[in-house]
Image: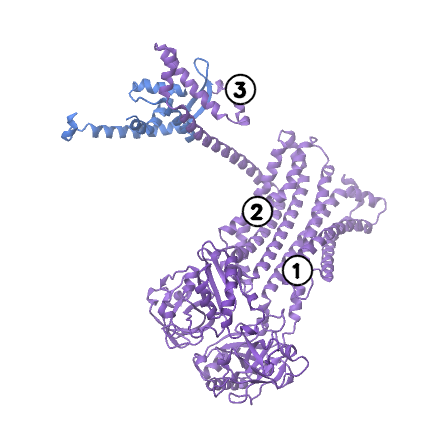
């Protein structure tokens, strides 16, 4: 089950990160905190996967990293959307909305085969 | 954000990131923050840390993956930085080119020509020497040279363990192919069917020969010598396209070869140019198991079995020699027969000694390129002096020495690469010209073309020359970084460069000497070649091939009739002084060796009872037409007919070798190996009486010794596949070809005449390679000498403009113009002399590589060295004359005011 969730999340995770950073530069923990808060911890995110994803986005040039000081004066790596990242986020959001809408329509179709109702 | 970056972070590029430390920091921060959050929510500190670690997951895996991604990021950044810098430098370089268009145009033009020349020559070397043969696993193909009779082939094929298969083919020859009444003379090869298997070539259409077709008496062609009534043929791609328009309907079609119908069974791909480049037809060469040990020698090739080497195959073949040698009837006459058995790679056997010529030319073109680089470096040094102020200013403004050097290097590399690109364009034109100039017998010329390998080579040498000639100017630029006085006088700054320029100019002369001496050696050798007496008079002598269809099937009488009528008609034709027929001619293929025994000498105890010789059937007018003088006895006359006693004429060399000072006239000889061609009218194997001795004649080339020759009357001689006609014409005879064909057609409509050429051109072909090398090298030598002269001219012009005040003072104090002239001429000649002193040992070390190409001249010939040195001094003098004269005419007042 955890494997399934991870697989499902890999694509979505990038969108989540871009969305989180759209509020402003944030460090990795900030991003994970934001995701947990907004999703009300529904995703049970293995927080570790966040970091490779952040670095991958950096390699793609969608986000930039810079070291700074955190609110409690510790050295922390802050990530910030680049113009390219903003454009990417806009594109992903429109695709995501249509995709989610379509999937929702399918799974909530009024009729289903009998065995689906047995649960 | 930027404001919060600690100042030390800005210098990251100097230290480089510590990725691992950064990653550790990042994850540690995450764990601490998470734990803090949990503690705030009321967790125990220990449990909180545990929970934080658990929710993070496998930190080692995370670090590993992030590290991998970060490396990619860093690589991308580094590349971007290099590219940006290079772009800046190149932009700067292009500005430099625009500022000094003339001097850069000269530099680039020199480079373009130099690169184009070396690229085109490389294309030839690459095509002929470097490219592998166009067959699968070409390095496994080998050629066996031995007494390769049919029996030897069968014997070796069945017994050799180191070789997979072996193929056997006699030398290709010309046949008349006629399709829909259109006749053409084409090169045809009789091959055993495993040839295609050995080479790994599949027909593009149809099939190879079947076992049935290879069988003697089957639908193939027997023995390779006699054309039977019906046969099969495989066409080359070219013939298929020309005659059948590439239509698959060609299969099964009837074509007429030498008057005999043949069925087309297959078409070979264009890549198959074997055994000869122009082979157009392949026939089955069947091997008669009852006639294994007679007949002529053919070529044998094979493919090494995996895991076996060429050396192993050679050893095995030599070991097998004694097992079949006793079957060869005449082998007992051959001294030391085993030593001739050898195996070599097929590629080596095809390329042969062309390798040496081409490598020498490639080395020569390398020298030209070197001199060119030196010349360009010299020009740039002079420019560098002029740019001294610019460089010092840059240095003063903070450009580091490395930065200045890099800028100069990029500038020169840009020039070199632009020139290289243009050079590739030019070499495209050069190659098409060069291919036409290449000696006709150079193997694999069809492989010569401008392809990606050649282009890569061109760009490679462009970069290398760019680096080579850019080195000194770059060093010069770094020194500018040290000289902080932007107002340094140019004259003082140029001192060191002047010295360098002189060294470089002298070096150019040294290299030029090597090429000039080599070229003179080759030209001298060519002259020697043309001075050799071939043993007959070359002027106005023309030879042609006359091929009556089915000649070998005709009786001696029929053939004599044809010959007599032809010669009779030619005698009447205007413009032809005399004409004769032979079965082969000098400077052509198709001569056969034979062995004869001398009657009365084969008594026991006499060493070497048999004599090796080359034998030739000639009509009675032959010696008169060739103007080969009779030394003793007589030559053939009309009494030596088909039914007369058998007679022979031998060459002087043969006479001296076996009869010494005694006369061979009257001696009787027999030909044990060729008896089937020499039977008399009664079918007996006759003895031939020697009736005369004629002068020696060179046959294959003029460099070696003339072969020992036995001439037999054509009328008493069977071994004829096609006739050769030799004619001495009265004058230049432009319409000879049409006249000749008309005359021959009158006698026999189906007989084609081909290969009509003067002996002048035939002789020319035999030393085509030497001539090609000599002319090309002479061209290179001229170019190099010219470059060296330009270099000296530049150095002197530069010297005059620097020494203007000095010259002014000299003139003001009473020096005559002549003295100033002498002073500068001396400077120029000193450079040349230094070049000669350095160049002489260099030349003597290099010319010995030419030894194999030289004829009648020693590679260290003192005359040649002296002449080359003289040429160098003259070039040096010419280069110095202009500047020296200019200096002598300077007005002292102008010169003095200049400073």
Quadrant of the drawing holding the N terminus of chain A: top left
- Please tell me which residue is depicted at 67% across the width and 42% down the height of the picture: B381
Residue B753: give x, y in percent of width and height: 48, 77
Q: Chain of mark 1?
A: B
**Residues at marks 3 and 2 touching, judged by CB atoms closer than 8 Å:** no
* Residue B434 in the image, given as x and y percentages of width and height: 55, 59
Q: Secondary structure at mark 3?
A: helix
Above or below, B668 against B878 in this view is: below
Res. B512 visible in picture: yes
Q: CA distance from mark 3 to mark 1?
A: 69 Å
- The chain containing the residue under callout 2 comes to B
Q: Which mark is residue B666?
A: none
**Of the pair B167 and A47, the residue shown nearer to us:** B167
Residue B210, image quadrant: bottom left
Classify residue B14 by image quadrant: top right
Write down the residue under mark 2: B462
Q: Secondary structure at mark 2?
A: helix
Image colour for chain A is blue
Q: CA distance from mark 3 to mark 2?
A: 45 Å
State whether discs 1 and 2 lie on one chain.
yes
For chain B, give the colour: purple
Above or below for B349 versus B72: below
Q: Position of residue B848 (x, y in %)?
A: 66, 58
Q: Secondary structure at mark 1?
A: helix
Crowding at dot 3, Cα within 10 Å, few <14 / some 14-19 / many 20+, comes out as few
List the residue tagged with mark 1. Answer: B519
């Amino acid at each position: 089950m955890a494997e399934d969730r991870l697989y499902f999340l890999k694509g979505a995770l990038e969108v989540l990160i871009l969305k989180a950073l759209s509020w402003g530069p944030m460090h990795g923990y900030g991003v994970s905190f934001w995701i947990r808060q907004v999703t009300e911890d529904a995703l049970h995110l293995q927080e570790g996967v966040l970091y490779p994803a952040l670095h991958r986005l950096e390699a793609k040039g969608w986000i930039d990293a810079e070291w700074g000081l955190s609110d409690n004066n510790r050295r922390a790596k802050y990530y910030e959307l680049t113009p390219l990242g903003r454009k990417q986020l806009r594109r992903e959001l429109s695709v995501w909305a249509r995709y989610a809408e379509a999937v929702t329509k399918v799974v909530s179709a009024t009729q289903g085969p009998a065995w689906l109702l047995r649960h | 954000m930027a404001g919060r970056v600690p100042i030390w972070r800005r210098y990251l590029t100097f230290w480089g990131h510590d990725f691992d430390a950064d990653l550790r920091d990042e994850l540690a921060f995450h764990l601490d923050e998470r734990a803090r959050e949990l503690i705030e929510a009321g967790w125990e500190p220990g449990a909180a840390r545990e929970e934080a670690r658990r929710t993070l997951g496998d930190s080692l895996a995370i670090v590993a993956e992030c590290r991998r991604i970060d490396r990619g990021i860093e690589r991308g950044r580094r590349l971007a930085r290099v590219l940006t810098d290079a772009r800046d430098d190149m932009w700067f370089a292009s500005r430099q080119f625009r500022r000094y268009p003339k001097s850069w145009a000269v530099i680039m033009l020199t480079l373009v020509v130099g690169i184009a020349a070396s690229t085109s020559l490389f294309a030839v070397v690459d095509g002929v020497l470097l490219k592998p043969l166009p067959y699968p696993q070409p390095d496994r193909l080998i050629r066996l040279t031995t007494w390769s009779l049919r029996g030897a082939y069968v014997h070796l094929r069945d017994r050799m363990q180191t070789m997979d298969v072996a193929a056997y083919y006699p030398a290709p020859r010309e046949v008349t192919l006629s399709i829909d009444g259109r006749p053409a003379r084409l090169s045809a090869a009789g091959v055993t069917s495993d040839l295609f298997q050995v080479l790994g070539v599949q027909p593009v259409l149809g099939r190879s020969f079947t076992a049935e077709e290879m069988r003697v008496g089957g639908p193939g062609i027997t023995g390779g010598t006699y054309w039977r009534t019906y046969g099969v043929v495989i066409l080359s791609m070219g013939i298929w396209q020309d005659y059948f328009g590439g239509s698959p309907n060609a299969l099964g079609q009837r074509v007429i070869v030498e008057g005999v119908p043949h069925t087309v069974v297959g078409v070979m791909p264009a890549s198959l140019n074997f055994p000869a480049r122009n082979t157009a037809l392949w026939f089955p060469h069947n091997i008669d198991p009852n006639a294994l040990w007679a007949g002529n020698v053919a070529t044998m090739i094979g493919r090494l079995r995996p895991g076996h080497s060429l050396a192993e195959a050679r050893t095995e073949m030599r070991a097998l020699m004694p097992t079949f040698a006793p079957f060869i009837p005449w082998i007992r006459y051959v001294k030391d027969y085993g030593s001739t058995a050898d195996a070599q790679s097929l590629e080596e056997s095809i390329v042969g000694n062309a390798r040496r010529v081409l490598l020498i030319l490639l080395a020569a073109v390398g020298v030209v390129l070197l001199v060119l680089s030196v010349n360009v470096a010299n020009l740039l040094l002079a420019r560098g002096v002029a740019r001294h102020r610019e460089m010092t200013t840059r240095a003063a403004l903070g450009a580091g020495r490395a930065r200045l050097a890099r800028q100069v290097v990029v500038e020169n590399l840009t020039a070199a690469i632009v020139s290289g690109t243009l050079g590739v364009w030019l070499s495209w034109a050069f190659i098409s010209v060069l291919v036409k100039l290449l000696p006709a017998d150079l193997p694999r010329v069809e492989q010569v073309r401008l392809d990606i390998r050649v282009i890569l080579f061109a760009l490679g040498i462009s970069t290398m020359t760019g680096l080579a000639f850019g080195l000194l100017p770059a060093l010069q630029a770094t020194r500018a970084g040290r000289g902080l006085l932007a107002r340094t006088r140019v004259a003082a700054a140029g001192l060191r460069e002047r010295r360098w320029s002189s060294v470089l100019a002298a070096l150019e002369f040294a290299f030029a000497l090597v090429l000039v001496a080599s070229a003179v050696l080759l030209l001298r050798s060519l002259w020697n070649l043309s001075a050799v007496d071939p043993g007959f008079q070359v002027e106005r002598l023309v030879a042609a091939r006359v091929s009556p269809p089915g000649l070998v099937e005709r009786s001696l009488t029929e053939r004599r009739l044809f010959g007599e009528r032809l010669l009779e008609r030619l005698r009447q034709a205007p413009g032809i002084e005399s004409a004769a027929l032979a079965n082969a001619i000098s400077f052509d293929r198709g001569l056969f060796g034979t062995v004869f025994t001398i009657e009365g000498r084969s008594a026991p105890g006499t060493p070497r009872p048999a004599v090796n010789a080359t034998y030739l059937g000639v009509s009675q007018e032959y010696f008169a037409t060739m103007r080969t003088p009779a030394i003793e006895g007589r030559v053939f006359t009309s009494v030596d007919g088909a039914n007369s006693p058998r007679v022979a004429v031998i060459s002087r060399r043969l006479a001296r070798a076996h009869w010494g000072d005694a006369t061979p006239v009257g001696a009787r000889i027999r030909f044990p190996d060729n008896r089937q061609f020499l039977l008399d009218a009664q079918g007996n194997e006759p003895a031939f009486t020697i009736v005369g001795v004629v002068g020696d004649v060179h046959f294959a080339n003029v460099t070696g010794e003339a072969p020992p020759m036995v001439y037999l009357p054509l009328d008493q001689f069977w071994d004829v596949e096609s006739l050769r006609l030799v004619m001495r014409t009265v004058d230049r005879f432009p319409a000879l070809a049409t006249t000749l064909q008309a005359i021959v057609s009158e006698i026999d409509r189906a007989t084609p005449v081909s290969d009509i050429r003067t002996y002048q051109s035939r002789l020319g072909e035999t030393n085509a390679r030497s001539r090609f090398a000599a002319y090309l090298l002479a061209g290179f030598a001229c170019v190099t000498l010219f470059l060296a002269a330009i270099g000296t001219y530049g150095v002197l012009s530069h010297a005059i403009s620097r020494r203007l005040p000095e010259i002014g003072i000299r003139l003001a104090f009473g020096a005559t113009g002549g003295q100033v002239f002498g002073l500068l001429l001396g400077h120029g000649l000193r450079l040349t002399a230094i070049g000669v002193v350095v160049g002489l040992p260099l030349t003597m070390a290099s010319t010995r590589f030419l030894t194999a190409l030289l004829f009648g001249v020693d590679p260290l010939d003192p005359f040649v060295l002296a002449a080359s040195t003289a040429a160098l001094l003259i070039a040096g003098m010419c280069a110095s004359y202009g500047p020296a004269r200019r200096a002598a005419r300077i007005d002292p007042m102008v010169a003095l005011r200049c400073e």
